Each structure stands twice: as structure tokens, then as C-alpha cells.
Image (spheres, grey):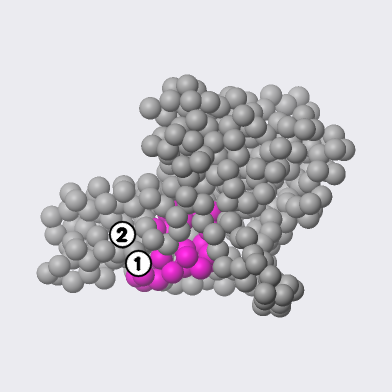
Amino acid sequence: MTLSNPDAFRQKASPDTVAIRWLGHGVQLLDQRRLPLEEHWLTIEGAVGVAQAIRDMVVRGAPAIGISAAYGVALAARGAGEDDWRREVEASIDTLAESRPTAVNLFWALQRMGGVLRQCQSREDAVARLAEEAVAIHKEDLAANMAMADLAVEAMELDKPCAVLTHCNTGALATGGYGTALGVVRRLHEQKLLKQVYADETRPWLQGARLTAWELARDGIPVTLNADGAAAAILARGEVKWVIVGADRITANGDVANKIGTYGLAVLARHHKVKFMVVAPASTVDMSLESGKDIPIEERDGSELRQVGGITLAPEKAGVFNPVFDVTPANLIDMIVTERGVVRTPEMTGMHRLFD
């Protein structure tokens, strides 16, 4: 693969939807804050800029965050001085690690890049090898997405098309170019097993409205946007057979941290006897944490709830609770799908069997 090829990760079924392009001298990130009104790319040539982009949600989605951070480390090597290059790259890794606290893919990617760094004997060696490793992480994520899509569709055992409901954005914009939960949706569509996708708008950042609906409509996949509060009414109609979501961290007992609102959706699915599937790469699994209570949950500024598009909708004196994620207990999940395989009715034994 040519490292400077910005179109290296375009794939079938999603020919134009990518969020990350490696240029060799820098990384291009599609500014997801501006979608769907404007497709604006930022070219970033240093690790500090990548960390800021992750923090500001220019790029989001656990796999995409990890890939972007890996490219940030590669850029740190390019920008390092000859005399103290190793210390400078290590400091950049620390900076990138501080950008977001919940998505474990970030730390997994940085640990992997750090392992390569420790093997490098010179700055020139580090520049080449870290770039190669970052590209490998990107390629592997895309391959994992394809594998998960196949495993999930097989596990669903559908004999006719059905409707599904999803939350947040887990597609090409959130990954290396195909999608986790939305990758399953793509594969269902390709195999003519998809009747309709219902996309929760996903407050407060509206990833479902701005990103998922945009991505699916762009690729000709039938999508209906709904307010988060309408999910119960949709499930009650009986048309939806599966709720399919992604994850930012999965613990050893099968608890899942995902975008705020996922837990409530799992409760609704169980009440309405709708199957609940989590789709995420193995890099999202954190076997060092026993359960969801150990996951650090990021909280963001209250202005994200008080304002929409810079327009204030709520009083400044009102307190705000703005967690980015919640934890869905394993006992509400029917299956977890990774590229390594499927864990049905997840619990500690099944998780250790697949991930130890």
C-alpha cells in the first residue's frame, strides 16, 4: 500500500464515506462537527493537533479515535528532533492518551505504537516503522469490520428481511471505513435482508441525525430518523427484530459502555422482546476491568445540552448532567460480536473463553 494514497481505504458499499486519510506528511480528518451541512477536511501534521481534534470531536467513534491517535504518534516521530526524538514521541503519546478517557481503543492503539517505538534504534527508523504500524492498525480495523459483519449476519439467522434500530454512529465515519454495528446494517442491505433502519437522533451531539442518517442515505440504505424518545413506540410496533449498537469499552463480564442512551434502549428492547446486539472490535474489550462499574465515564461541558448550533435553549442557571456514555449490563445483551467470534448471553466465562 502506498502510504501517501489518500483513497487507500475506500471500500465497496461505501465508496465515498471515509473519515481518515493518511497522507504520509500528515493525516486528514473529516470534521464531523460540520456534517451534514458541510464536508470539510482538516489536514493535521502533528500529534498535538490530532489530540485536540479527538478532544474536540472532529473525529469520534472508538475505532476511529484509536486509528487517528496511531497516526498522531507517527506524526510525532516525523516532527521530533534528532537528539531527543524518543522522549518527544513518548511525550506525544502521553498527550494523545489524555484526549478522551472512556474509549479503550485509544489506549490500545497507543500501547501498540509504544511497543514499536521501543524497538526503534533511530529517528529515521521510528518515522518509517511507526507510519507502517499506524497504517496496519487502520487496515486491520477495516478487515475486522468486514469479518464482524459476516459473523453477525450469520448469527442473526434471518429467513426474511427485517427492520433494525441503531443508536449513535458506528459506520464508516466512526471506524476505519466500513462500520461496526452499521457495518452489520450494510451487510444486511447487501444480502437483501434489511427492511428498514431506524436511527436514534442521539442527543446531545446528534450523531444519529447528522452522521448515521447522512451516511446511510448517501449509500442508498433505507433509513428513518427518530427522536430518542420515540424508540419505545417504534419497538412496540413489533417491526424491529434487532437493536444493533457499537461499544467504546467492554469489560470482562460483558458489560458495555456505549453512547449515552444505550442502557435505556437495552431495557426497552428486553421489555419488547427485541434482540440486542453489540458489535465492536476486539480492541474494545478490556479484560483488565471486571465489570462496567470500573469504566471511567467521560462528562462534558453543560453547554452541549443548553445549546444547539450555538443557540441557547435552556437557562444558564440550570444544572446539567452530561455524561457521554452509559453502561449496559451484560444481562440485557443477547450477543457481543467481534472479529474473533460471537459471545452469546455474555458473562465472565464466555468472555474469558474468547478473549484470554
Is 182 left or right of 233, judged from the image as shown?
Answer: left
Nearer to us in this view, 146 or 325: 325
User: Would you say residue 226 is visible in this rendering?
Assistant: yes
Vertical side of 34 occupied by 138: above or below: above
Instruction: Label 1, secondary structure: give it.
Output: helix
Is 132 left or right of 251, judged from the image as shown?
Answer: left
In which quadrant of the rendered view does residue 303 lie? bottom right
For disc 1, the neighbor class at 10 Å (few under 14, some 14 to 19, many from 20) is: many
User: Would you say residue 143 is visible in this rendering?
Assistant: no
Q: What residue is pinned by disc 2?
A: 93
Number of disc labels: 2
260 part of magenta stretch? no
Nearer to us in this view, 222 or 198: 198
Nearer to us in this view, 316 or 56: 316
**Residues in magenta, as a range:** 45-69
The quarter in which the C terminus is drawn is top left
User: Residue shown at 50%/41% (left/top)?
Assistant: 293
Query: Which sits earlier in the primary sequence, circle 1 or circle 2?
Result: 1
Q: Provide residue 295's location: percent of width, then percent of height.
A: 48, 45
Nearer to us in this view, 230 or 66: 230
55 part of magenta stretch? yes
Three-letter amino acid code of the residue under disc 2: Ile
Does the residue at mark 1 contact the one at mark 2 (Cβ under 8 Å)?
A: yes
Q: Provide residue 314's location: percent of width, then percent of height.
A: 73, 72
Three-letter amino acid code of the residue under disc 1: Ala
Q: What residue is pinned by disc 1?
A: 47
For disc 2, the neighbor class at 10 Å (few under 14, some 14 to 19, many from 20) is: many
Vertical side of 303 occupied by 219: above or below: above
